[in-house]
Image (tube, rainbow, N blue to C red):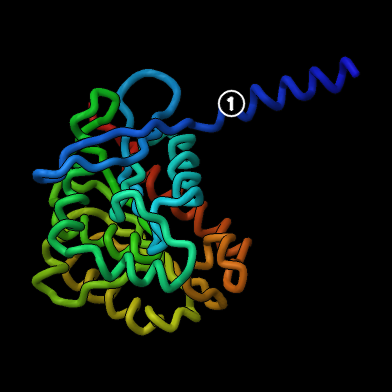
Amino acid sequence: MKQLLVCAFLLLLVSSAFSATGQDVTYKSGDETVKGVLYTPAGKGRFPALVVIHEWWGLNDWVKEQASKLADQGYVTLAIDLYRGKVATTAEEAHELSRGVPEDRATRDLLAAASYLRSLKVVHPTRVGVIGWCMGGGYALDLAIHDPKLAAAVINYGHLATEESTLQQIHAPILGIFGGQDKGIPPDAVHQFEQQMKALHKSIEVVIFPDAGHAFENPNNKAGYRAEDAAKAWQDTVNFLSKNLKKVPS
């Protein structure tokens, strides 16, 4: 019994040491005060940071878990809420909520989130990036387009821009992760995006998982989740962010 108690105590220590806790925060987006969940790594000093953008379901537990995991990797993370507190439980609700977000408000919220992170004393202001999945992946690209100071962007099967004048505005290195069986964002569209970015001398890395469909990284996607591909996508993300956000200038 004593050994079991010791093991349980050690497991508790390990889990608490590597699991960041979130705190609800508010910040200004134009004339509005919006909410998000902020995760901060243990330790002192200024950290790189990430705006974390939810899927079309809204700011649910899975997205918060990703933000917490990224904080465990050494990033201050801000999980934003584009739906103002609403979370969908059906595809019909998700479709309605995603279609109901005004484009100008979304852009304002994205820029406000990045600015909020840069204002924090624990954040290195030149090392703020973004990551998103599904709808949030598209918004991650939008933030890279609208924020010239962004230091890195990870697009997980999000919509892509095609206009040269739009892509020219991107200064952040981009990692794009996609599924080869995704009917909404097919490989041909991904390759075109990659080629356009390279032609404009932009930093772009693309990974396409041949047998994966849309939203393959989320285990809640019972029909499409692919554990091995998701693990590889996570490692690609960790490596990319480390390379582009952890080189903090002196």
Q: Is 11 drawn above or below residue 198 in the view shown?
A: above
Residue at image point 51% right, 72% down: 209
Q: Quadrant of the N terminus?
A: top right
Q: Which residue is mark 1?
A: 16
- Quarter of image, res 220: bottom right
Q: Is 249 drawn above or below residue 195 in the view shown?
A: above
Residue 224 visible somewhere in the drawing: yes
**Which residue type does callout 1 highlight?**
Ser
Residue at image point 34% right, 53% down: 53
Q: Position of residue 218 (x, y in %)?
A: 53, 60
Front residue of 198/3: it is 3
Residue at image point 42% right, 20% down: 43
Q: Helix, strand, or loop for circle 1?
A: helix
Front residue of 35/143: it is 35
Residue at image point 29% right, 80% down: 192
Q: Position of residue 119 (x, y in %)?
A: 18, 30
On the picture, is 225 further left or further right than 88?
A: right
Q: How many marks?
A: 1
Q: Quadrant of the C terminus?
A: top left
